Image (cartoon, rainbow, N blue to C red):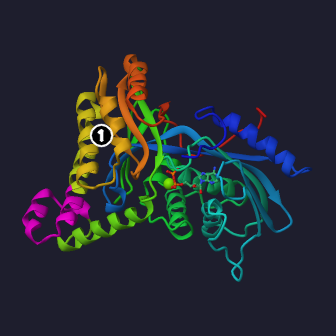
Amino acid sequence: ARAGTGAPGGGAEALAREAQRLFLRTFPGLEPCVAVAAPGRVNLIGEHTDYNRGLVLPMALPMVTVVVGCKSEDGVISLLTTAMEADEPRCLEFPVPSKVNPLNPGVPRWANYVKGIIQHYRARPLTGFKAVIASDVPLGGGLSSSASLEVAMYTFLQQICPDDGDLVAKAQTCQKAEHTFASVPCGIMDQFISVMGRKDHALLIDCRSLEVTPVPLTDPNLVVLITNSNVRHTLSGSEYSTRRSQCEAAAKALGKESLRCATMADLEALKASLDAEVYRRARYVITEIKRTTEAAEALKTGNYGQFGKLMVESHCSLRDDYDVSCQELDELVVAAMDGEGVFGSRMTGGGFGGCTVTLVETTAVEKTMQRIKDRYRGTATFYITKPSPGAYVMKLSGF
Ligand code: ADP
Ligand code: MG
């Protein structure tokens, strides 16, 4: 995966300072008076369940995307990103969209996430602005740099052209931008957690009712370790849409509004008439929703052993039934699990590369990372993370 600039987890302040310096060099004479940050996320359990109206249990990360900039009076939007996308220009200018002159997706591809937000933003009139984007969420690493970029841009627009402040509508607008401008038919999880994230808590999100239950995650003896496989297989886009259609087909065959409403008994009763692959996809989703409920309960009661067991079951079902894991992720999970003090480990995010998440005792973290490094045939990158806040406006006084 291509990393953004800035040391991962090096802090929103350092990123904002970097963005501010770049802003002053790029737009001399203007003052970057607005700075905002929005986090990436890691999902502890409940994968591919959001678009089945199920449950997810993510937490917001200390890694963020920041947007620093100011309004301008010239009717032009000027954007610059520090991200190291090898093949694309890093800056872009275009007129403020209007009814007769709306924004459309195009190139550079990275700007589509931003243009989608501007086009679908929930307040008007927009003015021109200049902004620099910097991020320490790894790009394409399954920690949702895309949602953090969308939510950061939305939060920036809220500062220059306030909307009604409705946070659910904000997350939904960011999701819509990803659907229509990046052509990724994602669920609501990534944008929702980037908006709603809460320090020291994972959030159990019901993607049908959008009800949120914060689950404390502050035990000093416990570490959430993320391991980046640093591979991304190109399959992920097309396979994602295929999985969605298969889930819809399964729900329809079962006569349910979504797989959220189906039980394993419903599925078994229809097994003979279902396509074998569709059956396995549905089995994954139905069991994953159940695992996620149980995992949230286990975390609440401090039963980490049970939580870890559910993580491993989740991984195995993602690998065997949903077919979205890959050799590298499987290797990382096996290496993580093969030692003392490790409760559980699983792939996280859409799959086909990206990261694993491991729940491990604080005293066993160093050994676990060493073991993974020794056994993994690729190059692994580690992030020791804490549940962090959702999107916020940064104070500029420290600059
Ligand atoms: P993930 O969300 O797991 O990181 P995605 O493929 O969904 O992976 O999104 C990654 C894409 O989002 C990048 O290829 C790039 O186009 C865009 N992106 C994310 N962060 C930035 C950034 N700071 N600057 C420019 N583009 C970004
Ligand atoms: Mg993404």
Q: Picture quarter containing residue 310?
A: top left
Q: Is residue 74 visible?
A: yes
The residue carrying mark 1 is 296
Considering the whole magenta stretch, tell me its main secondary structure: helix
Does label 1 point to a residue whose CB lies under 8 Å from ligand 1? no
Residue at x 71% of width, y 61% of height: 161
235 lies left or right of 256: right
Residue in the foreground of this view, choosing between 106 and 71: 106
Residue in the foreground of this view, choosing between 259 and 274: 274
188 lies left or right of 181: left
Q: Is residue 240 above or below residue 397?
A: below
Q: Is residue 122 visible?
A: no
Q: In the rendered picture of this protein, how many numbered marks are placed on residues?
A: 1
Magenta range is 259-283
Q: What kind of element bears circle 1?
A: helix
Q: Which quarter of the figure is the C terminus placed in?
A: top right
